[in-house]
Image (cartoon, grey):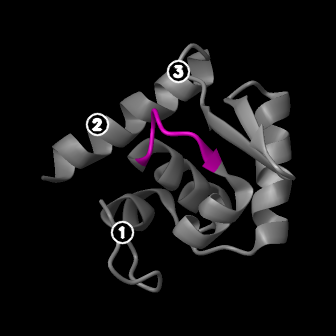
């Protein structure tokens, strides 16, 4: 699932759509278990920092993400595996990959 080129559309994006929210979910699933900053997310998902900030804010409110630590001004967060929506996102990602492999 890892992209070598941010312009390259992934299999998940071909099926689910190529929009910033899908790119964020894909990045979060790829790096589940690792805490990441908004800058990491924006760079890794190939979206603007402003867009990443807005999406992260919404996902934190929905408890799909949970904060882990702060380093300077940067807040780090991780996909909340205890959240039912997060669990379904992980399941959907796995299913898409399995059915298209």
Q: Mark 2 or mark 1: name the one nearer the start of the chain.
A: 1
Labels 1 & 3 near each other (Cβ < 8 A):
no
Residue at the disc numbered 1: 10
Numbered disc 1: secondary structure: loop
**How far apart in space, not on screen, are marks 1 and 3 (Cα)?**
23 Å
The residue that label 2 is drawn on is: 95
- Looking at the picture, how far across and down is residue 31, in whole percent? 44, 46
Q: Residues within 10 Å of mark 3 (few under 14, many from 20)?
A: some
Label 2 crowd bin: few (<14), some (14–19), many (20+), radius 10 Å: few
The residue at which mark 3 appears reads as 81
Q: Quadrant of residue 39?
A: bottom right
Of marks 2 and 1, the one in the foreground? 1
Q: Residue 52: image x %, image y %?
A: 75, 61
What residue is at 79 percent from the left and 27 percent from the top? Answer: 62
Q: Is residue 34 found inside the magenta-colored segment of the image? A: yes
Residue at x-position 44% and y-position 64%: 13
Circles 2 and 1 in contact, beta carbons < 8 Å: no
């Amino acid at each position: 699932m890892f992209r070598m080129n941010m312009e390259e559309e992934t299999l998940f994006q071909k099926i689910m759509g190529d929009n910033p929210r899908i790119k964020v979910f894909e990045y979060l699933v790829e790096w589940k278990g690792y805490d990441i900053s908004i800058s990491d997310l924006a760079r890794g998902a190939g979206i603007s920092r402003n867009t990443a900030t807005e999406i992260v804010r919404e996902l934190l409110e929905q408890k799909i993400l949970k904060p882990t630590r702060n380093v300077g001004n940067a807040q780090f967060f991780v996909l909340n595996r205890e959240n039912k929506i997060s669990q379904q996102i992980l399941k959907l990602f796995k299913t898409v990959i399995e059915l298209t492999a």
